[in-house]
Image (cartoon, coloured by chain):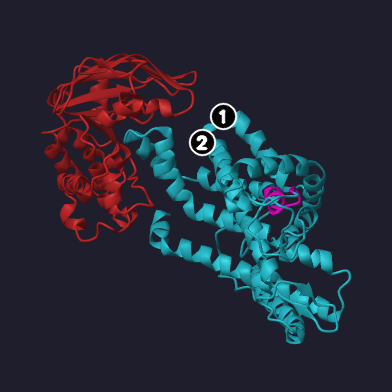
């Protein structure tokens, strides 16, 4: 239930603007990889390139290769919806569907994939909500609007919705930046739990968070505004935060830059 | 209302002049605004008094008056309609609600609303059945499929369609559109006459179908413009959420865009229905104006309340005008019921809509 992701010289553009330049990294199955770096350095762009959400924006394109267990994600013959089903995504701001109940939100992905049987949907909803540590809080009000939950609960609802379709990889784009410390902790606990089943890549601005949750850390940076972002250093989290190879990484994590 | 110019240009202070109003800058004797002694704009010196008749009170009064005006107008219309309609209905020698003919100008007035109300509702419903799916298709195309370079001018053209006066649509429907509709009706009659609405022996052309199709074209721009705006407002993050779950574009639209836009689309359809129900001259020119309740939509025939008012008002006497006003009252009631039904539909899902904000 988890796959390896290999990026080789991934370069992403928005129209003529080069957002990231030649990023290469390998993400092992069932690990948590944190991507850190200053704003605008291309972490999110890279993350969105991994499940082809990058190309949703008009004029966005990508060069280089991205494979998941040796299958090229960007192969012209590959069905993009299958890629996104395999590689789920949790966004920066909680985005449950406002017109749907908690239950409908969780099973939305399954319904999109043609699952109709009530018992299957019920099971999946319960399992996903339990995995997302939300079941006990919402089990008595599954029919209530998902948007009526608190911010932290909404984000866990979105995680439940993402994992309900049983993806191989879960991408998280600053999932805690809109949440208070307690909700953040709840999500971090959840990430540890999900690591047994999924490969997780998380973008975060919070270096303590990166140090706490991740196995590997990638540091992105830009030289100046308008330049493409680059992957400066990618290594074990412990090494990055104790003894980084690059001077830039050290400056960033000690707070002397960015 | 700015600073009082004299108090500054003469370089005197508020206390020198004995002025305590808010128009002076306070205690400074500043030569220029940048002077060291000039108090900051946020205060300095004593707190000025509250203005007794300021802009604040003025605007509040204006908006309250505007709001009250709505109620006054509605009540005035209701009183007018009822006061004119009641004597005419009293004079009616037949049941006003069920009688099928319209002879209000005779010494023994006999008239009923049944045919007219039926025709009004039938033409409007057919018009909406034709217009709404097309309008939603155009709106989705404009908001989610068309490249911006195409969507902007196309949207402009649609809005232009709404600006065409209804009498022009009527003329066009009568002189140009009738022929193709007649041929189409003949074709429908030939192959589908086993369906009652396409039955009959003719003549075809000046029919409910023609009136409804012209109405549909008139309703189309309203429903399209409003729906397009609503679809455009779908939060981008919800669209991305749907795409990230592995949906195709159409599935994304079904999951995120359409449910989000539903209350707005219902409102748009109701506005369109309002226009269809009240449309007068285009229907007066395209319908057959026959007093007969029939579900056959291709044979010459059809009538509506508003079209009948336009056609019959000229030669109506006192009772005749009262009868027409009574029919106007019925139209008013139909519109009211339709609007309330629409509100009820929207209200039922309010919990979801309110929490969406």
Q: CA distance from mark 1 to mark 2?
A: 8 Å
Residue B175 in percent (x, y) is at: 82, 44
Q: Secondary structure at mark 2?
A: helix
Q: Which chain is cyan?
A: B
Q: Is residue B209 magenta?
A: yes
- Residue B35 shows up from this direction: no
Circle 2 crowding by C-alpha within 10 Å: few under 14, some 14–19, many from 20 = some
Q: To which residue does mark 2 refer? A: B144
Residue B147: assigned label: 1
Using the image, name the chain to which the residue with label 2 belongs: B
Residue B147 in percent (x, y) is at: 56, 29
B321 versus B254 height, above or below: below
Chain A: drawing colour: red
The residue sitting at 66% across, 77% down in the picture is B97
- Residue A27 shows up from this direction: yes
What stretch of residues is rendered in magenta? B204-214
The residue sitting at 27% across, 33% down in the picture is A88
Using the image, name the chain to which the residue with label 1 belongs: B
B162 versus A62 height, above or below: below
């Amino acid at each position: 239930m988890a796959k390896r992701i290999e990026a080789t010289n991934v370069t992403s553009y928005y129209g003529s603007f080069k957002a990231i330049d030649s990023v290469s990294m390998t993400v092992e199955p069932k690990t948590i990889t944190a991507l850190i770096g200053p704003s605008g350095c291309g972490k999110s762009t890279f993350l969105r390139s991994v499940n082809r959400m990058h190309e949703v924006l008009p004029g966005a394109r990508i060069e280089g290769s991205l494979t998941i267990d040796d299958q090229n994600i960007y192969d012209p013959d590959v069905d993009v919806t299958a890629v996104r089903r395999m590689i789920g995504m949790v966004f920066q701001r909680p985005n449950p569907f406002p017109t749907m109940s908690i239950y409908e939100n969780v099973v939305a992905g399954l319904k999109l994939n043609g699952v109709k049987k009530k018992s299957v949907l019920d099971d999946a909803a319960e399992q996903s909500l339990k995995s997302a540590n939300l079941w006990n809080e919402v089990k008595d009000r599954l029919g209530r609007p998902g948007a009526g939950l608190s911010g932290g609960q909404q984000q866990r609802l979105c995680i439940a919705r993402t994992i309900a379709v049983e993806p191989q990889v879960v991408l998280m784009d600053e999932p805690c930046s809109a949440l208070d410390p307690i909700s953040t902790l709840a999500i971090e606990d959840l990430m540890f739990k999900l690591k047994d089943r999924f490969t997780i890549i998380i973008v975060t601005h919070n270096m303590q968070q990166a140090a706490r949750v991740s196995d590997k850390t990638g540091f992105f940076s830009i030289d100046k505004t308008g330049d493409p972002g680059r992957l400066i250093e990618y290594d074990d989290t412990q090494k990055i935060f104790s003894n980084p190879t690059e001077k830039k990484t050290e400056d960033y994590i000690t707070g002397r830059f960015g | 209302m700015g600073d009082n110019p004299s108090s500054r240009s003469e370089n005197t202070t508020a206390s020198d002049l004995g002025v305590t109003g808010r128009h002076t800058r306070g205690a400074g004797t500043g030569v220029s605004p940048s002077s060291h002694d000039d108090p900051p704009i946020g205060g300095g010196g004593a707190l000025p008094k509250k203005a007794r008749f300021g802009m604040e009170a003025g605007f509040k009064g204006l908006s309250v008056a505007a709001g009250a005006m709505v109620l006054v107008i509605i009540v005035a219309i209701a009183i007018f309609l009822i006061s004119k309609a009641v004597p005419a209905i009293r004079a009616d020698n037949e049941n006003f609600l069920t009688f099928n003919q319209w002879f209000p100008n005779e010494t023994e007035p006999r008239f009923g609303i049944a045919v007219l109300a039926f025709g009004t509702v039938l033409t409007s419903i057919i018009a909406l059945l034709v217009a709404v799916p097309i309008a939603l298709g155009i709106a989705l195309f404009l908001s989610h499929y068309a490249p911006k370079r195409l969507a902007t001018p196309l949207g402009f053209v649609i809005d232009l369609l709404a600006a065409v006066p209804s009498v022009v649509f009527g003329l066009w429907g009568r002189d140009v559109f009738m022929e193709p509709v007649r041929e189409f009706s003949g074709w429908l009659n030939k192959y589908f006459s086993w369906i009652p609405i396409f039955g009959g022996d003719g003549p075809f052309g000046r029919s409910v179908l023609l009136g409804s199709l012209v109405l549909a074209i008139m309703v189309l721009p309203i429903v399209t413009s409003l729906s397009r705006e609503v679809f455009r407002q779908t939060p981008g993050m919800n669209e991305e959420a749907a795409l990230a779950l592995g949906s195709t574009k159409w599935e994304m639209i079904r999951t995120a865009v359409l449910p989000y836009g539903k209350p707005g689309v219902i409102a748009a359809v109701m506005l369109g229905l309002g226009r269809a129900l009240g449309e007068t001259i285009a229907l007066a020119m395209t319908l057959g104006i026959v007093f007969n309740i029939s579900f056959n939509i291709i044979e010459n025939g059809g009538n509506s309340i508003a079209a009948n008012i336009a056609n019959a008002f000229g030669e109506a006497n006192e009772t005749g005008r009262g009868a027409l006003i009574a029919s106007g009252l019925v139209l008013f009631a139909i519109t009211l019921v339709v609007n309330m039904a629409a509100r009820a539909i929207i209200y039922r899902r309010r919990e979801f809509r309110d929490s969406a904000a």
